[in-house]
Amino acid sequence: MLNVAKRIWPTKTAFHLANEAGVSERAAQFWLAGQTGMTLAAARELMRGPHGFEFLVAYVGEDCEALWFQRCKLAHEVGVQSRKIRSEEKRFATLKAKQQQLALDLDREI
């Protein structure tokens, strides 16, 4: 799980990790240094946050074959792809509007 934190927050990792986990920055520093282990309560807070799915995968392992986890992974991927599609649809609509405006401007010049 700590590798995920380091990847998400490459700078001020302990600070961000502490904020998300609801612990002191010193506790997060101990975790990152390998001096103490993370509590279950802290791990739960990380999984409830904005990067929760990434922490969940790190916790249970990418190779987890449990049906509930496979469903969770699939639902997450559907959500990710849906957001990408909506973003591209908005971008496409903007481009089409610009194209139409340019066509109108060209008609006015003639």
Image (cartoon, rainbow, N blue to C red):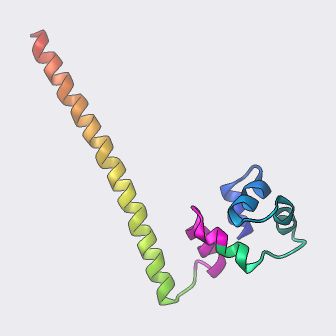
Residue that appears at 83% across and 68% down: 31
Where on the picture, by quarter, is residue 15?
bottom right
**Magenta region:** 45-62
Q: Position of residue 70 (x, y in %)?
A: 47, 82
Quadrant that contains the N terminus:
bottom right
Quadrant that contains the C terminus:
top left
Instruction: Give the residue at the far right of this rendering.
Output: 35
Q: Nearer the viewer, residue 60 or 18?
A: 18
Left or right placement of residue 110 versus residue 99 in this view: left
Q: Position of residue 88 (x, y in %)?
A: 33, 48
- Image height check: is 79 above or below 86? below
Instruction: Give the residue at the far bottom of this rendering.
Output: 66
Residue that appears at 31% across and 44% down: 90
Q: How many marks?
A: 0
Residue that appears at 59% across and 70% down: 48
The majority secondary structure of the magenta stretch comes to helix
- Image height check: is 93 above or below 35? above
Q: Position of residue 75 (x, y in %)?
A: 42, 73
Residue 48 highlighted magenta (yes or no): yes
Q: Position of residue 18 (x, y in %)?
A: 76, 61
Residue 17 highlighted magenta (yes or no): no
Residue that appears at 75% across and 49% down: 11
Where on the picture, by quarter, is residue 98?
top left
Left or right placement of residue 56 versus residue 73 in this view: right
Where on the picture, by quarter, is residue 77?
bottom left
Left or right placement of residue 8 versus residue 18 in this view: left
Instruction: Give the residue at the far top of this rendering.
Output: 109
Q: Nearer the viewer, residue 2 or 22?
A: 22
- Image height check: is 79 above or below 36? above
